[in-house]
Amino acid sequence: MAKRKEVKKPVEYLTPEAQKSLADRLARAEGHVRSIRQMVVDHRCADEILIQIAAVKAALNQTAALLIDSEMRACVDTCMGGSSDDRLDRVTKALSAVLKSS
Amino acid sequence: MAKRKEVKKPVEYLTPEAQKSLADRLARAEGHVRSIRQMVVDHRCADEILIQIAAVKAALNQTAALLIDSEMRACVDTCMGGSSDDRLDRVTKALSAVLKSS
């Protein structure tokens, strides 16, 4: 999925701090999913596994919220400077992606 | 989190097929989260990243549903054979874990 159509090269809407924070959160989520897989292999109780699955989902929600936050801030910055059409289009696309999946 | 309190050794409620299916799904989810991290590093558009985050959440929901299915089937099997109290307790715990997080 990282390769669908050509890679759009957008305005860099992520500050280095936001990018690092997102990448760190995703790295933790990845390790968390790996540990859940081990719980399945170890035949751990379903309720314990389900609680960990819920925790990963919560972490992904927080990651999505952080991403939307960065996108919105970058949008306001760009729109203050003039060209707002493309930029607003990108924000509404992002919001629509979140709302469709909630 | 794979190590909280002592490891309970439950009745093996997962058939080998269910266990493999769950482990495979979680392995795919892990790879998916890794590819999302790469999207963040590559400054891909927020809407593209959000769609992939939603896809991982959907995959985790399906994994949880499969786990509950296995737990319920094993519960019915055990309860038909007599001792139902502990077993029902485990199922209600599992359902409660899911309901709390939905």
Image (cartoon, coloured by chain):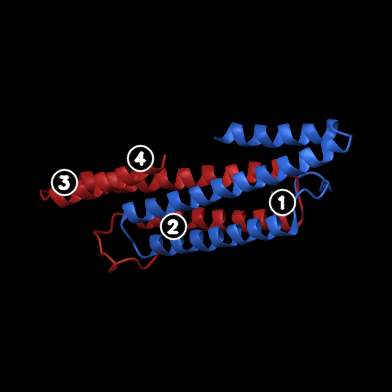
Chain colours: A blue, B red
The residue to which callout 1 is attached is: A2
Q: Secondary structure at mark 2?
A: helix
Residue at the disc numbered 3: B79
Q: Distance from label 4 to label 2 (Cα)?
A: 25 Å
- Closer to the chain start, of discs 4 and 2, is 2
Q: Which mark is residue B20?
A: 2
Marks 4,1: beta carbons within 8 A: no
- Between tags 1 and 2, which lies in front? 1
Quadrant for the N terminus of chain B, please.
bottom left
Kind of residue at badge 1: Ala
Disc 1 with disc 2 on a shared chain:
no
Image location (x, y in percent) of residue A79: 83, 36
Q: Nearer the viewer, residue A9 or A85?
A: A85
Residue A17 located left or right of residue B16: right
The answer to whether residue B14 is visible is: no
Do discs 4 and 2 share a chain? yes
Image location of residue B18, percent across then percent down:
39, 52
Judging from the image, what secondary structure is the residue with disc 3 in? helix
Please report, as a chain letter, where disc 3 is located.
Answer: B
Q: Nearer the viewer, mark 4 or mark 1?
A: 4
Residue indicated by mark 4: B99
Mark 4 and mark 1, same subunit? no
